Amino acid sequence: MARLSTSGARAPAPDHTSLNLTRLISRLQNTLLEPDAETSHRLRASGFERRKVGANLEYAKTLLLRLGQESPNVKPQPNKQDAQSDLQTKKQQLDALDARLHELNAAGQEYDDNASSEGEDLLGEDTPSESVGDSHTPAAGDTTDDDDADYQQILSERRAAAQATQTASQPQNARDELFPSSLRARHGDASVGVDTAQTTSSSTSAPITEALMKHHRAEQEELTTSLLSMAQALKASSQSFSQTLESEKETVDRAGEGLDRNVTGMEAASKRMGYLRKMSEGKGWWGRMMLYAWIFGLMFAAFFIVAFMPKLRF
């Protein structure tokens, strides 16, 4: 009972989901809201960096959604109020980070448009290879094959993007309900023309979802393995306990048999003692009375011989 009370007085284990969300929000704030010059330039110039930050932001929203689903299960009212206020603060922080990321996406889109226009200007200039005669012009059949290959590649990329969008639609709807500001920001970006960034963000959320599913599946398999090992250990302990009981049962049976033999021996000894007492006292009560009579008779005869026999003279 003392062990149970001691274990019940221990402090509750920290929520790892809340800790992970706090650390992730801190890293995202350092990356988006307080970046250095190199990080800011890399976010504006590289779409891959923006997609990576967007994937981390989507994962943070998923963690916040999970905490929001677990918050009604908190029993004490003060702890429940603290959890609700903490969730509201983290939601506001994620909204600010989401707005900053969309600003960076818009700036990056403008940067990409400027870079593409400069590339088109450079491609529009005459190159020395174009001044060469028609002998270096490729055949019409080769050009048609290259165009068909490019067209097939574009179609395959669009199909992959559509499948990734359908895969990420379900968790995205739950996050949109929790973060309406991010939904409005995404709709505003769509009107400006940032559909490509949304498609890439959705396509990157699909691998993250798959990685999370693999992680949860691995944890489930580990828990299943541990439960099986515990069940096997419990079965082995129960079998050993039953074997111990069987061995102790045999010992108790042998002890009972020994007690029965001792009782039988004591009864036989008591019978022998009674027989010896009967033999030592004669033939029972009548023999004892006869013995006493003989003793008194001999005493009287001795007294008569000593007292009266000398007085008798012939």
Image (tube, rainbow, N blue to C red):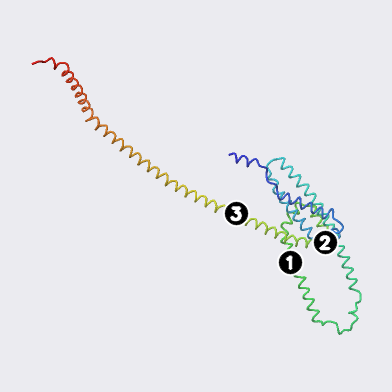
Q: Quadrant of residue 37?
A: bottom right
The Cα–Cα distance between marks 1 and 2, rounded to whole angstroms, is 19 Å
Measuring 73% from the left and 63% from the top, which residue is drawn there?
164
Task: Say which residue label 3 marks.
Answer: 226
Measuring 10% from the left and 15% from the top, which residue is drawn there?
313
Above or below residue 114? Residue 292 is above
Q: Residues within 10 Å of mark 2 (few under 14, many from 20)?
A: some
The Cα–Cα distance between marks 3 and 2, rounded to whole angstroms, is 48 Å
Judge from the rendering whether residue 199 lies leftward or rightward of residue 312; answer left or right.
Answer: right
- Mark 3 residue element: helix
Q: Nearer the viewer, residue 287 or 107?
A: 287
Residue extending furthest toward the left? 314
Kindly check if marks 1 and 2 are in contact, taking CB atoms under 8 A apart as contact.
no
Judge from the rendering whether residue 235 lies leftward or rightward of residue 43; answer left or right.
Answer: left
Q: Which mark is residue 194?
A: 2
Residue 4 at x, y = what percent? 60, 41
Q: Nearer the viewer, residue 277 or 99?
A: 277
Q: What's under tag 3, amino acid-wise?
A: Ser
Q: Nearer the viewer, residue 101 or 248?
A: 248
Q: Quadrant of residue 304?
A: top left
Q: What's under tag 1, amino acid-wise?
A: Ala
Compare marks 1 and 2 and give the one earlier in the sequence: 1
Q: Which mark is residue 58?
A: none
Judge from the rendering whether residue 53 lies leftward or rightward of residue 126; answer left or right.
Answer: left
The Cα–Cα distance between marks 3 and 1, rounded to whole angstroms, is 39 Å
Measuring 80% from the left and 80% from the top, which residue is drawn there?
142
Report the mark closest to the observer, 3 or 1: 3
Residue 246 at x, y = what percent? 45, 48
Task: Say which residue label 1 marks.
Answer: 160
